[in-house]
Image (tube, rainbow, N blue to C red):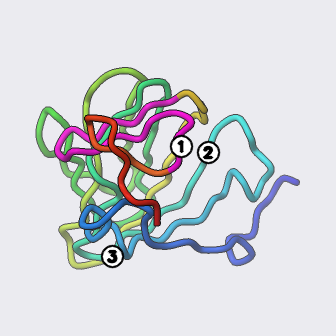
Amino acid sequence: MAKLNLHDIAERSGSDYPAPFDQPVAGRVWQRLGDAGGITQFGVNLNRLAPGQWSSQRHWHSSEDEFVYMVSGELVLITDAGEQAMAAGDCAAFPANQPNGHHLINRSGKVATFLAIGSRDRLDRCVYPDIDMVAEPGSEGYCHRDGTAYPVK
């Protein structure tokens, strides 16, 4: 398979974050392009954020690289260094095991679209520095920093 038809790829929305952390990302929409193309070594997702929505809670990965590429619209990239405007053609890279929490927020009045590309390491630990939450490798759902599990949705 080479060319993918976006209209044939299922759209997903919402979040599996525990409440209340799921609210800012509840309306995000994405399509798993890599999965649709049979790619197994890394993920490629086409994401749409309406005004006011977040891409995720601010996070970083222990063993997964992440890359985002802006397709259309405007978003604000928030990292440990502060805020940066992102527009079509802009990109950002987040190497594994560099604790630089990041996410995107749509503060504009229009829908914005971006590609998120990342490795798929089953031993990855995801840390959410602004909130009491981590995703541990091999565990279902999310945990508090002390290891106590949040209820699974």
CA gap, disc 1 to disc 2? 5 Å
Badges 1 and 2: C-beta atoms under 8 Å apart? yes
Residue 43, labelled with which disc?
Answer: 2
Q: Secondary structure at mark 2?
A: strand
Q: x and y percent of residue 118 in the render?
A: 54, 38
Q: Amino acid at mark 1?
A: Ile
Say which residue label 3 marks. 50
Q: Amino acid at mark 2?
A: Gly
Residue furthest to the left in view is: 82
Question: Is residue 46 shown left or right of residue 111?
Answer: right
Q: Residues within 10 Å of mark 2 (few under 14, many from 20)?
A: some
Question: Is residue 14 shown left or right of residue 138?
Answer: left
The residue depicted at 37 percent of the width and 48 percent of the height is 149
Q: Of residues 107 and 122, which is closer to you in this image? A: 122
Residue furthest to the front in view is: 148
Q: x and y percent of residue 153 in the render?
A: 46, 66
Q: Amino acid at mark 3?
A: Ala
User: Was residue 129 drawn as part of the magenta stretch in this picture?
Assistant: yes
Query: Is tag 3's residue or tag 1's residue first in the polypeptide sequence?
Result: 3
Q: Is 103 placed above or below 94 here? A: below
What residue range appears in magenta? 124-140
Q: Secondary structure at mark 3?
A: loop
User: Quadrant of residue 95 in the image?
Assistant: top left
Q: Of residues 29 and 74, which is closer to you in this image? A: 29
